[in-house]
Image (tube, helix red, strand yellow):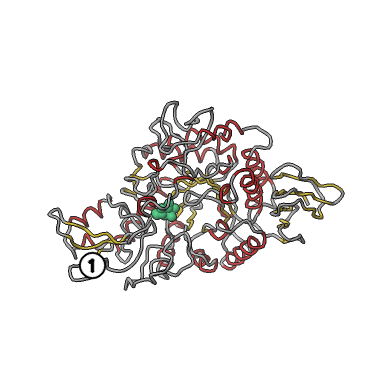
């Protein structure tokens, strides 16, 4: 199939968790000016685009995914002028910029929600959210049995200033994140306008938060009480996720994006397990790409990975969309740690990088993976900020361990993340000195140099990026494929060295000891390489 050469079809997109990237003013939180200062690092790394997580006005009940004003920057992160300056610099350096849009819910501090709370039950101001009377004689039970993804019920009851309890409102996430009612026309109009506001400023697209949410089964039916209401699972069908009506919204957004000059990308964050269901979001008149969470959640297992790769390519090809690959983001345990932590975790993570960047399509890189950062699993309890922690009755530590600020340079925390003596919003482990960017930059064999080389080759070689792939014969536990013209990707996922038939040269290898001689490629345990064919 011939495709238009949209930039996102083969982009390497770097995810910036704004709060943890670089802190320009020493208040302990990353900000837009900090990103701007560090942009040359990203140019040098060789990424094509960046995705910024929410920097909008927010009480940060869920790290900014609780937006109080969709059209302004939180003072902690900067100003609209800082945003414009960052966008301008990024464009000048050849880097595109996409931003998060959070349409399933707002913050409880949003002016609409404040109006709703102040209004009477049944008043028009309540209709933009999902308010219902409770069940039971005095309405003391929630309207249904839906559970919040962060733990506890998905409904919170309002209380009048005089203490009288009244209606309940729905929040699939934190109580500080009330769900919009997407049957209300004003909600549609508002988001049309929010998209336009940022596209007018020049953004290259949006990552759509909880893109499989928004539309609820209008009867709000109870769910199976044993259903796993965990969004990161996606295996259960739930009356508030992946409802058919959501596609109507994306057809409209697609037309809005297409009405702008330049290529504006719409990317779905949809935790839907089945790749055919995901592909429905990527039909030609809907969104452009979706995160491949089936790939992200696949275990270290060659047979399973091959199945996921084939399944993803097939489902996306069927709708003419490009496939994406992703190993980490701000919601999951960093892949070094998922793959076993320590030396083994890092070895596997590096091998997985050449696989991901060698596959057809585009790839998402989460800040810090280019440094080989592991999850921080020993954050002190009093430092934890993820709503998961409190909502789960302090049983789930949540996602802070992958959100620890980046180590840039120096021997002690905050490692250049902020000025000396500043206190980062999450403590940075002292053991990270050896992982800082400065300690890896220019150092042969470092994870940072591996990413740089791979990203450079990915740009230089026609075979990589968008296109197709052909599997080559390989023993169990090994993935081996060809990208035309002239590149082979080999990944040994076993714990023993393997030999494969190969000619050509090693272009890049994930670790030491990879060589081609007399028609044989030797790949040490848990390593990968790209070869010229
Ligand atoms: C998305 C975000 C996550 C957030 C949730 C609610 O999954 O990636 O961080 O908690 O949406 O907005």
Q: Is residue 62 left or right of residue 98?
A: left
Q: Position of residue 306 (x, y in %)?
A: 66, 62
Instruction: Mark 1: give few (<14), some (14-19) or many (20+) Cα within 10 Å.
Output: many
Q: Nearer the viewer, residue 504 or 373?
A: 373
Q: Say which quarter of the image contains residue 310.
A: bottom right
Mark 1: C-beta under 8 Å from nearest atom of ligand 1:
no
Q: Residue furthest left?
A: 162
Tally of marks: 1
Q: Position of residue 35 (x, y in %)?
A: 47, 37
Regarding residue 101, the answer to whether it shows in the image is no
Which residue is drawn at the image coordinates 54% and 38% (left, top)? 93
Which residue is drawn at the image coordinates 42% and 26% (left, top)? 421
Q: Residue tagged by mark 1?
A: 134
In this rendering, the answer to whether 286 lies above or below 530 is below
Q: Position of residue 229 (x, y in %)?
A: 41, 64
Q: Say which quarter of the image contains residue 494.
A: bottom right
Regarding residue 294, the answer to whether it shows in the image is yes
Q: Say which quarter of the image contains residue 440.
A: top right
Q: Nearer the viewer, residue 49 or 168?
A: 168
Q: Nearer the viewer, residue 63 or 218?
A: 63
Quarter of the N terminus within the rendering: bottom right
In this rendering, the answer to whether 503 lies above or below 236 is above
Q: Nearer the viewer, residue 319 or 272?
A: 272
Q: Position of residue 105 (x, y in %)?
A: 34, 57
Q: Is residue 475 left or right of residue 50?
A: right
Which residue is drawn at the image coordinates 46% and 53% (left, top)? 207
Element type where label 1 sits in the image:
loop
């Amino acid at each position: 199939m011939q495709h238009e050469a949209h930039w996102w079809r083969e982009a390497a997109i770097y995810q910036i968790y704004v709060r943890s990237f670089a802190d320009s003013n020493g208040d302990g939180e990353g900000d837009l000016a900090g990103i701007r200062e560090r942009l040359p690092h990203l140019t040098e790394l060789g990424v094509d685009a960046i995705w910024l997580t929410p920097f909008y006005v927010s009480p940060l009940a869920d790290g900014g995914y609780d937006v109080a004003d969709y059209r302004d920057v939180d003072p902690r992160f900067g100003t609209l002028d800082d945003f414009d300056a960052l966008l301008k610099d990024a464009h000048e350096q050849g880097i595109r910029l996409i931003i998060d849009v959070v349409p399933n819910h707002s913050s409880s501090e949003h002016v609409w929600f404040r109006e709703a709370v102040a209004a009477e039950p049944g008043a028009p101001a309540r209709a933009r959210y999902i308010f219902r009377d409770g069940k039971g004689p005095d309405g003391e039970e929630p309207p249904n049995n839906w559970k919040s993804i962060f733990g506890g019920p998905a409904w919170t009851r309002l209380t009048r200033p005089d203490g009288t309890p009244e209606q309940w409102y729905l929040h699939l996430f934190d109580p500080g994140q009330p769900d919009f009612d997407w049957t209300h026309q004003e909600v549609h109009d508002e988001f049309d306008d929010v998209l336009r506001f940022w596209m007018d400023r020049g953004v290259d697209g949006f990552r759509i938060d909880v893109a499989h949410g928004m539309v609820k089964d209008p009867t709000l039916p109870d769910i199976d009480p044993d259903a796993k209401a965990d969004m990161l699972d996606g295996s259960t069908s739930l009356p508030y996720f992946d409802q058919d009506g959501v596609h109507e919204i994306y057809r409209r957004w697609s037309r809005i994006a297409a009405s702008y000059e330049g290529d504006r990308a719409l990317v779905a964050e949809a935790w839907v397990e089945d790749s055919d269901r995901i592909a429905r979001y990527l039909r030609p008149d809907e969104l452009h790409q979706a995160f491949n969470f089936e790939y992200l959640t696949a275990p270290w297992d060659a047979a399973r990975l091959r199945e996921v790769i084939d399944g993803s390519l097939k489902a996306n090809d069927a709708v003419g969309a490009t496939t994406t690959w992703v190993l980490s983001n701000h919601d999951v345990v960093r892949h070094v740690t998922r793959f076993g932590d320590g030396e083994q975790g890092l070895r596997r993570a590096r091998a997985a990088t050449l696989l991901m960047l060698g596959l057809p399509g585009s790839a998402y890189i989460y800040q810090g993976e280019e440094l080989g950062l592991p999850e921080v699993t020993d954050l002190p309890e009093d430092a934890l900020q993820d709503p998961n922690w409190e909502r789960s009755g302090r049983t789930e530590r949540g996602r802070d361990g992958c959100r620890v600020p980046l180590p840039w340079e120096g021997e002690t925390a905050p490692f250049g993340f902020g000025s000396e003596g500043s206190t980062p919003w999450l403590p940075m482990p002292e053991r990270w000195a050896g992982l800082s960017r400065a300690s890896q930059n220019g150092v042969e064999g470092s994870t940072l140099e591996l990413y740089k080389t791979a990203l450079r080759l990915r740009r230089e070689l026609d075979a990589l990026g968008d296109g197709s792939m052909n599997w080559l014969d390989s023993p169990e536990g090994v993935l081996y494929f060809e990208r035309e013209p002239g590149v082979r990707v080999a990944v040994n996922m076993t714990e023993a060295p393997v030999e494969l038939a190969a000619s050509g040269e090693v272009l890049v290898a994930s670790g030491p000891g990879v060589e081609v001689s007399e028609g044989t490629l030797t790949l040490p345990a848990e390593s990968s390489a790209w070869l010229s064919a």
